[in-house]
């Protein structure tokens, strides 16, 4: 999916909601566990219920890996089921030396390899440019680089000062020499909304993938007021608050309801942005 | 495996060789491709051929993931086949917010989850302490934290100055407040041997996992002279130079030969260290 296609989706749906598919067999409604593939059955219902309000889906790869080979089959089926009009994100946080990142890129981008062809993947920056470039070698695919994450541990290294900058700013500036905003997004946690204005100064056009609204306590309003751009510029992720809104037979309806509330709020911020 | 058990293995085998199982179906001998599980057949032969000379095995998870569900089955069988006396490393470079690192830890440490129970896993430090602690929650399991990697891109962020230190030193110092040398190792590339003396000052007792000898051009001698400790303190990895020493029917013999050459050289450095 291109930058402008993603931007158009946001206008059309009046939403920049990304639904995080952190699907945990221990948390989904018990009655689904008798299904042949409970994780896929759950994801399918969640996607059907939320596709009207979401522009992106983000399977968190850890949740699938933890199921072994079976988990990879659930992941393949889930990705196939995500509507083409929605942006797909492999939340994998990979990154290794070149020949190994090459293989991670094949895994998540080349359907011939592991049956997966995501639009994008999250990547950790610690190992530098040659750990990231193999992902950018895939035409039309996106890298979403960790910059300032939502967890407390982000203070340990990301907030350390390097000259006049903090490490996360150095990451954002350096990475922009590797690819333009049409191929590169950054992860910025919703709990870090105070830094969003600074981030917009150094990355005015990049989309930001923002987890941490909901269960982690970030504010959608703060993120939106500081992060929105003319092209949209945000993908705000919600996982647990949507997936586990109910553990009964009404789980999909409740998920739909939660997604709709977020979409309505987003429509308001988009309208406010237009008026600015 | 405990610190002293690992140390004893090193004395017993007079080796600190780790064999990296970066098994690529495109590179293994062609005649193996008719086997039901060519990757496992290849790994089994490599392990049989090298176990006398190696104290550790390190499957590079990217190579298995890139095969989809089938790859995870090859990985399970390979791990089961690694002798108990050898230290096993999941080279996965994972790291995410707590609830997600939890699942990665389950994947690689808890056999009940994905059928895998490695002794250790490589972890990326960028997200800080709460992304690493879930791996340390597994009694007796090890975290091998990226510090100063072997690739050119290590200069981009790892070598940036934070006050008097560089980022990789900050990582090594900070991580030592999370766990002792009985649970925590660091990755230091063999191409970074110049920094090994500095690293030994701040991490005198931690084992270092050292990739980059062989195909990547690092010197085993430089690494050994600067990195060895009384307990051994090094696991030096070789992958491609052993695995792909031949692409014919003699691949296992040639792998054995390469492993033996490295072991002999290591025995010499261990003897030299004792004389110091």
Image: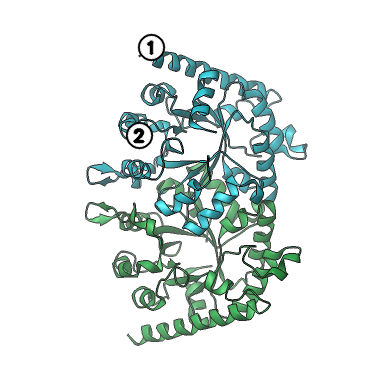
Chain colours: A green, B cyan
Give the answer, above or below, for where B54 lies relative to A72: above
**Residue B49 visible at all:** yes
Residue found 53% across the figure and 54% down from its top: B102
Which residue is under mark 1?
B275
Question: Split into 4 quadrants, where in the image is the C terminus of chain A?
Answer: bottom left
Is residue B272 found left or right of B104 in the rendered image?
A: left
Q: Which residue is mark 2?
A: B203
Rendered-image quadrant of the N terminus of chain A: bottom right
Q: In the picture, residue B147 is in which quadrant? A: top left
The residue most toward the front is B139
Task: Identify whether B6 is placed above or below B22.
Answer: above
Q: Position of residue B135 (x, y in %)?
A: 50, 48
Q: Residue A86 in the image: x percent, y percent?
A: 57, 72
Give the residue at x 42% y 83%.
A270
**Chain of the residue under label 2:** B
Mark 2 to mark 1 CA distance (whole Å): 22 Å
Percent from the top left, x then y, of residue A265? 45, 83
Which structural element holds mark 2?
loop
Q: Which one is nearer the viewer's eye here, B166 or A109?
A: B166
Assign a secondary structure to mark 1: helix
Q: Residue at x 52, y 21 (%)?
A: B15
Q: Nearer the viewer, residue B276 or B240?
A: B276
How many labels sit on residues?
2
Image check: B71 left or right of B268?
right
């Amino acid at each position: 999916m291109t930058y402008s296609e993603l931007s158009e989706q946001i206008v059309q749906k009046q939403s920049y909601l990304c639904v995080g598919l952190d699907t945990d067999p221990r948390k989904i409604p018990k009655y689904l566990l008798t299904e042949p593939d409970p994780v896929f059955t759950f994801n399918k219902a969640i996607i059907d219920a939320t596709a009207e309000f979401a522009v992106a889906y983000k399977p968190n790869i850890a949740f699938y890996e933890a199921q072994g080979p079976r988990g990879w089959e659930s992941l393949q089926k889930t990705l196939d089921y995500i509507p083409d009009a929605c942006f797909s994100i492999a939340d994998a946080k990979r990154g290794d030396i070149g020949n190994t990142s090459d293989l991670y890129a094949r895994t998540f981008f080349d359907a011939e390899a592991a049956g997966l062809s995501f639009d994008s993947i999250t990547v950790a920056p610690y190992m530098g440019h040659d750990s990231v470039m193999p992902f950018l070698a895939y035409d039309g695919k996106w890298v979403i680089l960790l910059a300032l994450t939502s967890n407390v541990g982000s203070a340990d290294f990301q907030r350390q000062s390097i000259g006049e900058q903090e490490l996360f700013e150095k990451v954002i500036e350096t990475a922009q020499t590797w690819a333009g905003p049409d191929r590169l997004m950054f992860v910025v946690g919703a709990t870090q909304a105070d830094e969003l204005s600074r981030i917009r100064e150094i990355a005015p056009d990049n989309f930001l993938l923002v987890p941490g609204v909901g269960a982690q306590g970030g504010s959608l309003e703060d993120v939106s007021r500081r992060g929105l751009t003319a092209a949209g510029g945000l993908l705000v992720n919600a996982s647990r608050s949507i997936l586990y809104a109910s553990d009964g037979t009404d789980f999909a309806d409740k998920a739909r309801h939660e997604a709709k509330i977020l979409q309505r709020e987003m429509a308001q911020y988009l309208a406010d942005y237009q008026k600015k």
